[in-house]
Image (cartoon, rainbow, N blue to C red):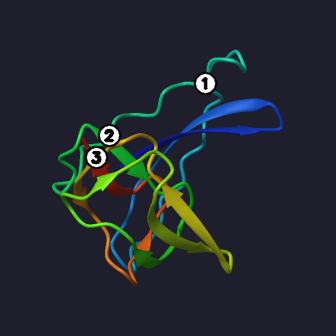
Amino acid sequence: MKYYNITVNGVAYSVSVEETAAGAAPVAAPAAPAAPKAPAAPAAAPKAAAPAGAVGAVTVKAPMPGNILDVKVAAGASVKAGDVLVILEAMKMENEIVAPQDGTVASVNVNKGDTVNSGDVLVSMN
């Protein structure tokens, strides 16, 4: 089950999405309006468990869904802030995913050709 906060026409809704087995009939449940929130303080999303490969203190996540065209680093590599870690193709554009800070690559959680979703951990760093 995944939980999302969605705003439609200025009204915030808290929704939960459950994946069903193939061929299972979907069950519709009415969404209840969430309590009004201040625009400057969005609600924090529930914390997901860290993937098994994520061992570094800093994680670099996919900003959007797409395909991994190239992985430019390997575990153990030293990188500087702004160095390209991964090339992510989204909407027929190549996006360079860069290191947010200086450090050492702890793990690379994707391979060339992988498909990723927004928020998936691509690389972890120390």
The crowding category of the residue bearing disc 1, from other C-alpha atoms within 10 Å (few below 14, some 14 to 19, many at least 20), is few
Cβ–Cβ under 8 Å for marks 2 and 3: yes
Q: Position of residue 91 (x, y in %)?
A: 68, 75
Q: Which callout, 1 or 2, points to the residue nearer the camera?
A: 2
Check disc 3 and give the amino acid type.
Answer: Met
Q: Residue at x 22, y 57 (%)?
A: 107
Q: Residue at x 60, y 43 (%)?
A: 30
Label 2 to label 3, Cα distance in Å?
5 Å
What residue is pinned by disc 2? 58
Q: Which callout, 3 or 1, points to the residue nearer the camera?
A: 3
Q: Nearer the viewer, residue 1 or 30?
A: 1
Q: Position of residue 46 (x, y in %)?
A: 39, 34
Kind of element beneath mark 2: strand
The crowding category of the residue bearing disc 2, from other C-alpha atoms within 10 Å (few below 14, some 14 to 19, many at least 20), is some
Check disc 1 and give the amino acid type.
Answer: Pro
Residue 14 in the figure: left or right of residue 77: right
Kind of element beneath mark 1: loop
What residue is pinned by disc 3? 125
Mark 2 or mark 3, earlier in chain: 2
Q: Position of residue 40 (x, y in %)?
A: 69, 18
Mark 1 or mark 2, earlier in chain: 1
